[in-house]
Image (cartoon, rainbow, N blue to C red):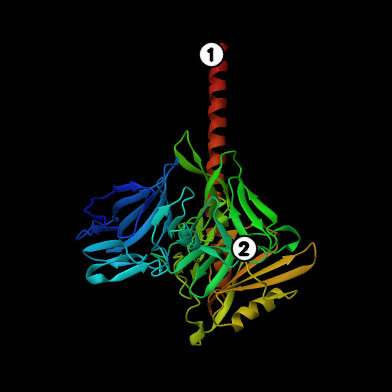
Amino acid sequence: MNVFFFVFVLLFNYVFSESSIGIGYKLMVQVPGKYEIGGFIGGGYLLETKTVPNFRVALSIEGVNGKFSCSLLVFLGDVKVWDSGHYSRFYVTGKCLLEFTMDGDLRLKGPNETLGWKTGTSGQGVKQRLQIQNTGNLVLMDEFNNVKWQSFNFPTDVILRGQQLDVATRLTSSRINSSMFYSFEIENNKVALYVNSGKLRYSYWNFQPSMNRSITYIKLSSKGLLLFDVKYKKIAQIPSQTVQPLKFLALKNETGNFGLYYYSPEKRKFEASFQALNNTCDLPNSCRPYGICTFSNTCSCIQILTNDKKGSYDCSEGFSEDFCSGKKAEMLEIDNVSSVLKGIPQTVNISRDACSSLCLQDCKCAAALYFRNASVEAAECYLYRLVLGLKQVDKGAGFSYMVKVPKGIGQNHEKHNLKRWILLAVGVFDGLIVMTLVGGFVYWLIKRRSRGSRSGDRIS
């Protein structure tokens, strides 16, 4: 039986550097008493491959909101590609123990034998080893080299090259500091990105095979993300945009974007060969709720003028949470603004006023988007319970965004001021940039003429 005890500082250290370990193995890490603001992460590597960049398995302690989380991690180079605590954190004090039991179960335990995570393979014939494969798949093998458990079956926010995911599977971003999270989901006819908040779920990007063909599973190859049907036939591909072989697909926790990544030997780091969204304003959280992403990629908040003519630019303030308690409401219309959040239209071929009424009749509705396509003479109405992902669009594009606000705001004279302030808020940054460019050009022109005049005087 191999037993290791490891006390660490603010980094990882090697405890073991084989590609596999056998039953009876134990590794314990000591948890610090406290850590400074800004976080703490440390632990020990116990497995690694010989590839470049290599995969490494680590027992990790991480400081999260004043507590310590213990988990088993897989790294590719310096990038975390799998985490046993991605969906459910195991918080410990004093110590954390990784134990490969004699009956074949891999477990994380805290003080007083507290069980925080396990593979659930006890009694399944796991007598051989825990192994990290060259693909990055962490596996438990039996004596006949059959896989009894593998990390590839429990995806987090990364797909590794060679990894296959079936329909109805999804990747999710971390939920440590927010109830809102992102997901990359495999559906019957598309792969899509969603923003999730409680029971609410809105798509903001998708990729569909042609002719509405059905997807059975996806697989990341060295050249792109491949989509297959039930007959194992490739029906679509999101291609890589570099000749370098891909290493992984990742869903970004901060932005909700996803990309395909390769390793650059020259720069010794991973770089994106493809990203789903390349424009900042196309991201769902480019601005805070009730904020508008402008053409200059800056955020402008919707200003609400109350009856005392005082306004607020605080994007964090909402106006819909009290409407189900009987508070009266009206819809504030904002021209030339749309939302990146997509969904199924609530109804089609109705008027803008009818779309507005649908939101007013639903106390949980926070906003409505009305889109009229003049070229085909069709109209669509979308209702939202989140005021998020707003962005400025070209005048005449056919979009009208309506936000639910308390009754009495924006009436008569104040309504005129409100629209004026909103237009100012949306365009103020763009206007400043234009004024700066024009002013600089005029200044340059005056200086040039002045120098030309002085030169003429000297020649004469």
Residue 418 versus residue 247: which sits nearer the camera?
A: 247
Give the camera-side residue of 219 and 351. Answer: 219
Residue mark closest to the camera, 2 vs 1:
2
Residue 39 in which image quadrant: bottom left
Query: Residue 222's x, y, as percent?
Result: 58, 45
Element type at marker 2?
strand
Asked whether residue 336 appears in the rendered view, the answer is no
- Residue 30 versus residue 443 in the image, above or below: below
The answer to whether one can see residue 167 in this image is yes
**Position of 160 compared to 37: left or right?**
right
- Indicate the position of residue 120 as horizontal and vertical percent values: 40, 69
As measured in the structure, the alpha-carbon distance from the residue carrying label 2 to the one carrying label 1 is 60 Å
The residue located at (59%, 75%) in the rendering is 331
- Percent from the top left, x then y, of residue 97? 27, 62
- The answer to whether the residues at label 2 and label 1 have Cβ atoms under 8 Å apart is no
Above or below, comparing residue 75 to residue 172 in the picture = above
Q: Amino acid at mark 2?
A: Ser
Image quadrant holding the N terminus, namely bottom left
Q: Badge 1 is on which residue? A: 458
- Farthest-out residue, top: 459
Instruction: Tell me which amino acid carries mark 1.
Output: Arg
The image's mark for residue 338 is 2
**How many residues crowd around disc 2 within 10 Å: few (fewer than 14), some, or many (20 or more)?**
many
